[in-house]
Structures are given as structure tokens and as C-alpha cells.
Image (spheres, rainbow, N blue to C red):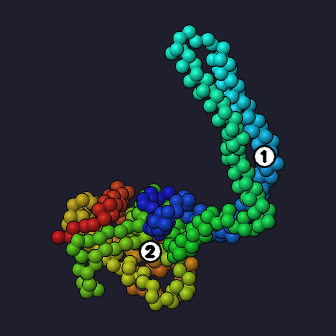
Amino acid sequence: MSRTFNTIGSLTTLKSHLEENNIYDFKSLKEVIDFQSSFTISRENLISQHKNLIEEEKNTLNIELKNFETAREAHQQQTEQMLTAEINKLRQKLNITISNTPTNLFQKISKELRLWNYKRKIKHKEKTFDSDVKRTISHLIDNYQVKRNRYQFITSNVDEAVKQSVHHSLSELERKKTVVDNLNSFIYGALGEQKVVKTLENLSDEYFLINDFAVSFSPAIYNRQENNYIKSVQIDHILVAPSGVFLIETKNWSEKSLENMSLRSPVQQIKRTSFVLFKLLNNEMSNYHLRLDRHHWGDKKISIRNLIVMTNTKPREEFQFVKILTVNALLGYISYFKSIFSINETQRIADFILRINEQKVIETK
């Protein structure tokens, strides 16, 4: 099995866009695709769940409303007993005070004050007895009224009750669907890249697969072939093989996409990357770091082959310096070339490219 590095680019971009929209549900590309394909069923299941929740709520309310009168009577009785006990306790204190005989003027005045205070408290508690009882059960009555209103609403407006219940969850589900659908180009891209990666992983461990190679340059590199400057390059896969380096750009395009003039040419993209990588791999500095075994004729050149792999449909045309292949033809094409590097040399080349990729920005001065 080939040695693989980095997550495929489309998948990384897809995950980034999802997280920007606060979507963290999906752990794999398969989960995203399953979500799309099962959306209608998920929506129906969600509504069904909330129908069941509303039915359960109605049944619970019905039982609670039936039990309300018993609960109210029990609470009222408990409150009346408590208030009656307080009044009786005050009366006991009043009777004890009446039975006490004062021996001096001070005790007589103190007794009169206590008698007045006990009588006042008893009178106040007797006067507010009914209102105090009502106040202690008022929260029960209010709660009963709320539940009664809710029960009547659910009973007479089942569909509206379900609609209100499911609204937030359904809105979130539909929002996710909209976000995911807007990312279809990345989903298709990730599907294509995943097919290519799985195919290339069938190669032996003498092959090194680097996904999502991307670097920028400061300042930009001048490209004499195109008479322009290259600020950055990105390629889906770089396969470092004993036979050399393969740049692989994956496209999961339909025939309509092939004919779309607004889509960027993958041929131009891969040629730009090939030009840059050739310069990075074949110079005095890279030769020093790579330490490739010398041939008696001179330094070895690291050949770079440009491949565009179409996972859906393939154009009939051929292009200069770029080979267009289907996924099924990919391994056969790579295996056609003879080995020119040892396993150690191949690994040093892969390590060198990985270090370049980790830099992200390369100073070219």
C-alpha cells in the first residue's frame, strides 16, 4: 500500500465551509452524501417525531388536569391546617397570659401589652384566613389555567401545534441542506479525489502519495514559457514513484462541465505547477539536499509527468505535455514507466516535497 500524506483538498475545503456555517455533524464525506440523499426521509421523520411529542404532551396534560382538583384540595387542606395550628398556638399563649397574675405595676402593664398583641394577631389571622389560603394555592390555579389553555390549543389545533414544535429543528435541518447543496462542487470534487486516492493506495509502499500540495511564492516566480508571474500553485495529488514524479489533477466533471468555458483549464493549472515543481526539484540547492546517487554521466534529473484524471467523463482531445486518463487506466499508466530511483532516493524526494508543502510560503529571493 502506498504511503499517503495529507487530507484531500476538496474535503478540507468542504469541512472548512461547513464549520464556517456552524455545521459539525459530519465526520466523513459519506455522512455528507448520506445526509443529502436521505433529507426527505429525515424531514418526514422529524415531523413524525414531533407529532408523537405533541400527542404525548396532550395525554400528559389530560392526566394532570384530571388530577388538579385532588391536588388543589390537598394543598388547601394542608394550608388550612397550618394556619389553624398557628391561630391555636396564639390562643394557647393568650390563655396562659390571662391565667398569670401580676405582682406589681410593671408586670400588670406587660401583661396587658401581651394580651393586646396576641388578640391583635389572632384577629388578623382569622380575618385574612381565607385570603391566605387562596394565595397559597394561587400558583396551582395559574398553572392549571396555563395547562388547560395549552390542552385546548393542542386538541383543536393539532397541525399548528406540531408546526410550532418542529419549527426550530426543521429550520436547522433545512439550513444545513441549503449549505450542503451550495457545496456540491466540493462534494463532487472530493468524491473524485477520493476515488483517485483509493486507486493509488493500491500501489506498493515504494510509492509516496502527497495530497493537496499548495505553496505560495514571495516574490512571484517568472514563467518564461507563458510570460507571466506565478504567485502560487495547487495540485490535488503528487505521486512520488521510483520512476519519477507524477502530478495528478482530479476532475469529477460531467460533459456539460467539460464544455463550460468559464471553468478554469486544468491543463494550464497543471502546467504551471509542473513548471514550478521542476524548478524546485532540479537545481543546485535541491541536489544538495536530495543527495541523489550520481550517474557517471552527471546529475540525475527528476522527471515530472502531468496527469489529469477524469472520474466521470473524458474529453476526446489530447493536449501537449499533459496526459488525460480515466481512473481505471491510472495504475496501468504509472506502472508502465521503469524505475530510475532507489527506495531511499524516492523517499528523499517525497520528504523534500513535503517540506516544501509545509512551508506554505517560499521566499524566492
**Residue 345 placement (x, y as % from top left):** 33, 59
Q: Which secondary structure lies at badge 2? A: strand
Residue holding disc 2: 249
Callout 1 amino acid: Phe
Residue at figure coordinates x 69%, y 32% from the top left: 83
- Which residue lies at the image location 59% right of the left edge and 62% below the top edge? 31
Q: State yes or no: discs 2 and 1 in contact (Cβ < 8 Å).
A: no
Q: Secondary structure at mark 1?
A: helix
Residue 253: x and y, percent?
53, 80
Q: Is residue 131 left or right of residue 10?
A: right
From the top left corner, tell me how far across and down residue 84 is, in percent. Answer: 72, 30
Q: Nearer the viewer, mark 2 or mark 1?
A: 1
What is the quadrant of the C terminus in the image? bottom left
* Residue 218: x %, y % from top left: 23, 71
Residue 68 got which mark?
Answer: 1
Q: Residue furthest top?
A: 103
Outermost residue to the front:
105
Q: Residue at x 72, y 41 (%)?
A: 130
Judge from the rendering whether residue 47 lies leftward or rightward of residue 62; answer left or right: left
| Residue 140 higher or lower than 18, as above or below | above
Q: Count neighbours of disc 2 (C-alpha within 10 A) and say few if under 14, some if 14 to 19, many if 20 or more.
A: many
Q: Measured along the vertical axis of the image, is residue 112 above or below residue 133?
A: above
Which one is nearer the viewer's eye here, 82 or 281? 82
Residue 325 versus residue 344: which sits nearer the camera?
325
Q: Could you tell me if residue 196 is visible in this image?
A: no
Q: Residues within 10 Å of mark 1 (few under 14, many from 20)?
A: some
Say which amino acid is labelled 2.
Glu
Q: In 3D space, how far apart are the residues under numbered discs 2 and 1 (Cα atoms)? A: 71 Å
Is 114 placed left or right of 138 in the picture?
left
